[in-house]
Image: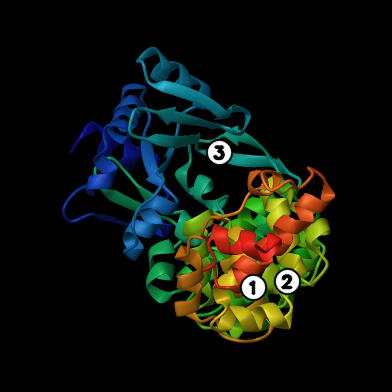
Amino acid sequence: MSDSHKSREQSDQGQTASAQRGLVQDGLPDWAQRPLVRRIFDGALALGGEARIVGGAVRDWLAGYPVGDIDMAINLPIETVASYMSARRTRVVETGLKHGTITLCDAADQIELTQTRVDLETDGRHATVAHDSDWTRDAARRDFTINAIYLDADGAIFDPLGGQEDLKGGRLRFAGDAGQRVQEDALRMMRYCRFLPRFGKAGIDPEAHRALRQQAHLCAALSGERVGNELRQILRGRRLGHVIAMMHDTAIDQAALGISLDAAGLNCDAAAESVIADLDRASGLGWLGGLAAVMPIGSAAALSERLQLSRVENRWLARLDQGLDDEIMTMLAGARWRQAAYYLGDMAALLYAVQSWRNRTLVSRQRLAEISVWQAPENPLCGADLLSHGVDNGPGLGQMLKDAEARWVKSNFTLAKPALLEWLFGN
């Protein structure tokens, strides 16, 4: 038995009765053997402690999903670990030192490392924590059972809250008392809504549902930045209509955003999530389309302030809020779609999708793809062309350019410069 395994056995002594543990048949998976992960495992052992991978990486791996960011926990004071790793030329970023967290970096990875801890005091947004080397108590303060599964350096799993069984059964449960967990951090209610489509196939846990309905008002105290970051992930996630409906049913939407959301439009289109994903890949702002489709018309300004949107996000949401009239939608659906898309610019595809959902109609994926990839031709006429024909530089010139542009667009972009000049000036 290795030294690290002995350390784990000693640390878990007295806790194993309630823990589900087992050895991974083929040792550590490849993603858990990356150089920085191994360096953290070895550093913890050298300091007389132990590090374990915990949270989303272990959860997603066990569930068969691709592993993204890796988080780790260590049963040593984080200041000691930071000094040790820094002295050995590992870059240390003190991202949350007062909360017991640092980020360790190498050329390939960034790993968030947190000391095992207990909460001394919470206010619904932040916690005052203290180091505690007990792994079970560390697990008990986490949000969900499926996020409280640990993987150690030997490939052994420590699962004191039954997270593996919940994963297998499609159950999303809070770790321990649901009401207490959401009082510690109200953002966990929005996280529950986001995680449920992927990990809660058995349906919403009754205790969780009760906690969400009773404690939703706590979301009003969350910062706009935290709410906005969580909302972005929700709007880029699965079963969006279902999640929005749950946020409305529990009044989380009203508390967190100050508005009531309506998922009816999205629920009319089974492909809405993939449409948003496609648009998000193209611009990074597709999630705003989902938001515009479920928010009340006229609420863009209030939401922008609440969510602390960037200038670009604010501009896009305000335009999406205005929507499109029936004439433009008819053009986009018909043969003249390029003419409408020309005037709508880089927001054409998103505007088309949002207005379709507002109208409770399906988005034509073919037309959406056509709008998304279409490159508007360059206007053949410019101000210099008119100046060379004796037009004074002033408002009149601008109006003539607009008139000529409108005629060019109406011709489906077929008229060339000579034809436009002839139309303006005759022979």
**Looking at the image, can residue 20 be seen?**
no
Residue matched to label 3: 117
Q: Secondary structure at mark 3?
A: strand
Residue 93 in the image: above or below residue 287:
above
Q: Earlier in the sequence, mark 1 or mark 2?
A: 2
The residue to which callout 1 is attached is 354
Q: Based on the displayed image, in which of its 4 quarters is residue 253 positioned?
A: bottom right
Q: Residues within 10 Å of mark 3 (few under 14, many from 20)?
A: many
Q: Are marks 1 and 2 in contact (CB under 8 Å)?
A: yes
**Element carrying mark 1:** helix
Q: Nearer the viewer, residue 175 or 104?
A: 104
Q: Residue at x 38, y 44 (%)?
A: 53
Amino acid identity at mark 1: Val
What residue sits right under mark 2 in the picture? Answer: 323
Relative to 59, does residue 102 appear above or below in the rendering? above
Single out the mark in the foreground, 1 or 3.
Answer: 1
Give the Cα distance between marks 2 and 3.
Answer: 49 Å
Q: Is residue 302 left or right of residue 377?
A: right
339, 159: nearer the viewer:
339
Give the quadrant of residue 24.
bottom left
- Answer with mark 1 or mark 3, whichever residue precedes in sequence: 3
Q: How far from the left and from the top, in percent, is residue 355?
A: 67, 76
At label 2, the amino acid type is: Gly
Q: CA distance from mark 1 to mark 2?
A: 8 Å
Which of the two discs, 2 and 3, labels the residue nearer the N terminus? 3
Q: Does dot 2 land on a helix, a strand or a loop?
A: loop
